[in-house]
Amino acid sequence: DVKVTQSSRYLVKRTGEKVFLECVQDMDHENMFWYRQDPGLGLRLIYFSYDVKMKEKGDIPEGYSVSREKKERFSLILESASTNQTSMYLCASSLGPAVDYGYTFGSGTRLTVV
Amino acid sequence: QKEVEQNSGPLSVPEGAIASLNCTYSDRGSQSFFWYRQYSGKSPELIMSIYSNGDKEDGRFTAQLNKASQYVSLLIRDSQPSDSATYLCAAFNQAGTALIFGKGTTLSVSS
């Protein structure tokens, strides 16, 4: 069974902290994505990666960066956490062109910045 | 900015009825579409994909695509209380590299 694992289910961080959200997939997928989900705003794309060391900005990259040193791991970094980054963060992966395969999502990380 | 739009609901149907969920998209170039189901507090899970005009059936679910009218729909036959969830419609962005999601329609099936 395919699996996308996010390291933390719930996380509480202080304003100004550097925060790392980890995502690991065991399916040898090429494409990985980070979204955030907020009530009334839906799912919004932060960053995605289609290969190791490659990254592309999504619709709301400000305040975030990413790292993909290995194919199976895609990390989202909040450089200096702010309260407006309190959200549910969802990682997803796709085998090939997602146009054919769609996404598999991780279970999500609910981040609260205080 | 390409968009995918859905009525937020809630859509309420009795058990055993047909639930009809609708979605419109703005990019005429979009080629593939996906329906996800999301239970409260959980992550989205893929239900169906559709690429061609017409209907695609999978068990109790039927996806319908009309590219000329730029709408996608999902029909759920014999609705069950376990179908109560938020349903997300998704289409590809202009570059074809990532999915754009609608805000979702909340379905409530009463027993």
Image (cartoon, rainbow, N blue to C red):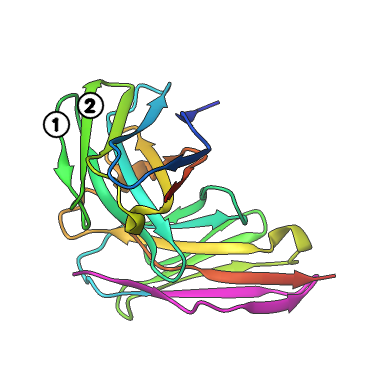
Q: Chain of mark 1?
A: A
The magenta segment? B1-23
- How far apart in space, not on screen, are marks 1 and 2 (Cα)? 7 Å
Residue occupying image coordinates x 39% and y 40%: A91
Q: Name the secondary structure under disc 1.
A: loop
User: Left or right: where does residue A41 sit relative to residue A46?
Assistant: right
Residue occupying image coordinates x 61% and y 60%: B61
Q: Position of residue A112 (x, y in %)?
A: 45, 49
Q: Position of residue A9 (x, y in %)?
A: 53, 37
Q: Quadrant of residue A26?
A: top left
Q: CB under 8 Å between callouts 1 and 2?
A: yes
Give residue A68's mark.
2
Q: Position of residue A68 (x, y in %)?
A: 23, 26
Amino acid type shown at disc 1? Met
Q: Residue A46 colored magenta?
A: no
Front-lying residue, A15 or B92: A15
Q: From the viewer's perspective, is residue A111 above or below residue B93?
A: above
Give residue A54's mark.
1
